Image (cartoon, grey):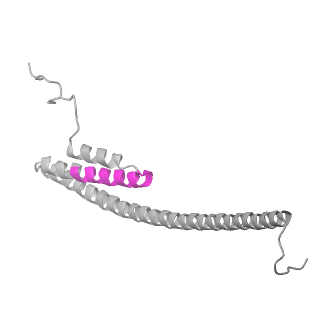
Amino acid sequence: MVWEPGATVSLEQAIWVTVFVGCLFVVTTYLVSELKIAEDEKVEREKKAAERRVNRWMVAARVATAEKRAVEAEKRAVKAEKRGAAALTGAAVAEASGVSTEKAVAEASEVLAEKAVAEASEAAERAGAEKAVAVAEVEMTGGGETGGRGSTGGGGSTEG
């Protein structure tokens, strides 16, 4: 079929051209959407991979920090143990010499309480629980007792 000037197009030819152009439009739109979906999936995969890398780095940093804290806690526990042994020895010497042992015993109990706090701190770091440290500190200071002698929690006097 040759196009000549002044020639007319039949209705059937116009319909076929319209259908062909419409099909090209649909196919082009589909391919563009598939390319966009593929690009979005690629970006999402890269984002998740980056998150996994960051999470690995964060875990490694937390492990290193926990190991460092554990080493420091062990050092503090050793120091507290040495101070506790020295204080107990001092209390024994003071008792043997007849000097008042109240001060020496108080120092020894304070050192032992510090050792208990250090051990509780190490356990808390390993377990991830800081509650044990707070409990040990409360026990060291003597606070937190309820219902014992001299307690004000009962609402009345303990003396008759």
Closer to us: 111 or 142: 142
Q: Residue at x 22, y 55 (%)?
A: 87
Q: In this view, does 60 lie to the left or right of 11?
A: left
Q: In this view, does 61 lie to the left or right of 23?
A: left
Q: In this view, does 119 lie to the left or right of 49?
A: left
Closer to us: 62 or 72: 62
- Find out whether residue 117 is within the magenta segment: yes
> Magenta stretch mostly in which secondary structure?
helix
User: Quarter holding the N terminus?
Assistant: bottom right
- Find out whether residue 10 is within the magenta segment: no
Closer to us: 91 or 146: 146
Closer to us: 142 or 80: 142
Percent x, y for residue 113?
26, 49
Q: Is residue 26 left or right of residue 142?
A: right
Percent x, y for residue 104?
16, 51
Instruction: State the image quarter where residue 143 is shown.
Output: top left
User: Quarter holding the C terminus?
Assistant: top left
Magenta residues span: 110-128
Q: Which residue lies furthest to the left in this view?
A: 160
Instruction: State the image quarter where residue 90 is shown.
Output: bottom left
Q: Which residue is drawn at 81% across and 63% down?
A: 15
Q: Which residue is drawn at 25% across and 44% down?
A: 138
Q: Which residue lies furthest to the front in this view?
A: 6
Percent x, y for residue 5?
82, 81
Compared to 146, does 20 lie above or below? below
